[in-house]
Image: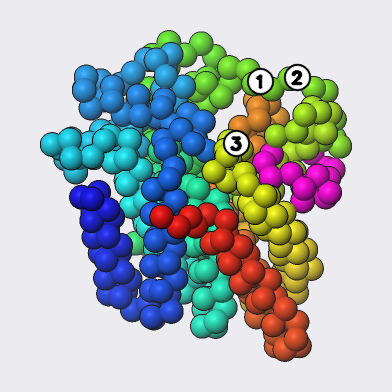
């Protein structure tokens, strides 16, 4: 009972923050609905459900909290990861969870929910800063807040929870800096990117994005000394963060350069070895994508990268389990798969027209950052073939510009044809409602 009262307090505090930031009542209702759905999902989801290494994540936290030391790389699955998230979890367990009023596992799920609220808050800041129309913002916000993997990730005990927040924060500050060139945004982006590197190797994507835009700005002769200074500072800070992150592995018996950078991700393939052909990365099996509820396939020869990436953007790579495996869930899963294909198709057709001229300059940060994320994920999969290395959660912040892009396409289409705009909005709302129906379970 106390735990649920605390969750209610967290929701109220979150809504007060949104109100303070002058988001309208519709956005507050969306946020409240999302957080209530996440809390409902938490109520019937244990630590290890849809979270294949939840126990190992807790073990890392316990070692820091109870023994005041960093674990050896071989003591748990994620023990090769940088320690920032786990140190935060240890601090959380010694403060917010002091007294044992709630189990460590539930307490860390609560922490994930708090971090997800932070992720949602930055998402809303990005959407509002994009300058889109009121209903476009609302559609994009609803898609982000109720996207199926948003609900799953909201209570997962995993360092992705903190890494995604820092990566999205870096994306936000880079976009603001690119638009206004104020130093405060540059240093905000630099701090967020460095903290992401100290949380997980996925932070290299936003670090590369920041360096890319500094180099891009060097093409202009105006204020070149200032830009060279920013480049030097960025390289120094990001290189120091990367070296510090890898030193935790190197000093604790890492064996190879790959392990020093990526930890246990380089240990080997967990699924049957297959011949890596171009078709594995270029082909997309539409019927299998729609019919199959999870990403796992019986025939390794039909284990396609794009299928796994797209399906994991909905339901992750861990088995959904019996609670989400009923006939109703299978139908809803198929419906969401079809809706995702429609959204992807509309985005592919509409984005080129949307991102012309001044609009491309306005949104180029998000385009470049998503491109870096996809490229790094593909390189990760090629370097360390593994069923968990093509999971959308590694690039989860890409969901925000994706939803913004789709909502922008709908808005742009609506200016030309009211019917097309209405159809696009209906598809987005249908995805939201299907996700609610999929995860909601009455007490």
Nearest to N terminus: mark 3 or mark 2 = 2
Q: Tell me the quarter of the picture where residue 423 sits.
A: bottom right
Nearest to N terminus: mark 3 or mark 1 = 1
Evaluate whether residue 397 shows in this view. Answer: no
**Can you say whether 54 is above or below 411 in the image?**
above
Taking the spot 56% from the left edge, 70% from the top edge, the residue there is: 140
> Could you say where residue 345 lies in the image, as x and y percent from the top left?
78, 63
Q: In the rendered image, which residue does mark 3 sit on?
A: 319
- Is 80 part of what is drawn in magenta? no
Of residues 257 and 3, the one drawn nearer to the viewer in this rendering: 3
Crowding at mark 3 (Cα within 10 Å: few <14, some 14-19, many 20+)? some
Of residues 107 and 74, the one drawn nearer to the viewer in this rendering: 107
Which secondary structure, mark 2? Answer: loop
Q: Are the residues tagged 3 and 1 within 8 Å (C-beta)?
A: no
Q: Tell me the quarter of the picture where residue 414 sits.
A: bottom right
Please tell me the numbered disc located at residue 269: 1
Q: Nearer the viewer, mark 3 or mark 1?
A: 3
Evaluate whether residue 83 shows in this view. Answer: yes
Taking the spot 35% from the left edge, 43% from the top edge, the residue there is: 109
């Amino acid at each position: 009972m106390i735990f649920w009262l605390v969750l209610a307090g967290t929701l109220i505090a979150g809504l007060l923050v949104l109100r303070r930031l002058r988001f309208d009542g519709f956005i507050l209702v969306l946020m409240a609905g999302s957080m209530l759905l996440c809390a409902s999902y938490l109520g019937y989801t244990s630590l290890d459900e849809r979270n294949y290494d939840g126990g190992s994540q807790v073990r890392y936290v316990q070692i820091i909290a109870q023994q005041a030391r960093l674990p050896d790389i071989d003591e748990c699955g994620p023990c090769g990861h940088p320690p920032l998230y786990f140190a935060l979890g240890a601090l959380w367990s010694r403060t917010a969870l002091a007294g044992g009023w709630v189990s460590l596992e539930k307490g860390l799920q609560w922490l994930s929910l708090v971090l997800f609220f932070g992720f949602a808050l930055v998402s809303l800041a990005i959407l509002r800063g994009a300058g889109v129309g009121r209903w476009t913002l609302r559609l994009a916000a609803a898609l982000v807040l109720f996207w199926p993997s948003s609900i799953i990730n909201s209570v997962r005990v995993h360092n992705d929870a903190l890494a995604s927040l820092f990566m999205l924060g870096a994306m936000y500050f880079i976009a603001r800096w690119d638009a206004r060139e104020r130093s405060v945004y540059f240093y905000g982006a630099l701090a967020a990117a460095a903290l992401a590197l100290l949380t997980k190797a996925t932070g290299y994507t936003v670090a590369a994005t920041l360096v890319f835009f500094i180099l891009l700005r060097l093409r202009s002769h105006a204020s070149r000394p200032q830009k060279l200074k920013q480049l030097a500072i960025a390289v120094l800070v990001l290189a120091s963060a990367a070296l510090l992150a890898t030193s935790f592995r190197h000093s604790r018996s890492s064996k190879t350069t790959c392990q020093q950078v990526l930890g246990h991700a380089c240990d080997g393939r967990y699924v049957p070895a297959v011949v890596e052909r171009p078709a594995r990365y270029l082909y997309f099996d539409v019927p299998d994508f729609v019919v199959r509820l999870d990403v796992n396939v019986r025939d390794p020869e039909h284990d396609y990268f794009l299928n796994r990436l797209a399906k994991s953007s909905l339901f992750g790579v861990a088995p959904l389990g019996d609670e989400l495996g009923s006939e109703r869930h299978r139908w809803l899963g198929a419906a969401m798969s079809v809706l995702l294909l429609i959204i992807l198709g509309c985005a592919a057709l509409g984005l080129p027209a949307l991102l012309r001229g001044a609009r491309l300059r306005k949104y180029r940060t998000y385009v470049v950052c998503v491109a870096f994320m996809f490229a790094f994920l593909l390189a990760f999969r090629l370097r360390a073939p593994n069923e968990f290395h093509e999971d959308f959660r590694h690039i989860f912040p890409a969901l925000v510009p994706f939803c913004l892009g789709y909502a922008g396409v709908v808005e742009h289409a609506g200016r030309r044809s009211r019917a097309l705009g209405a159809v696009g909005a209906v598809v987005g709302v249908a995805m939201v409602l299907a996700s609610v129906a999929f995860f909601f379970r009455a007490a």
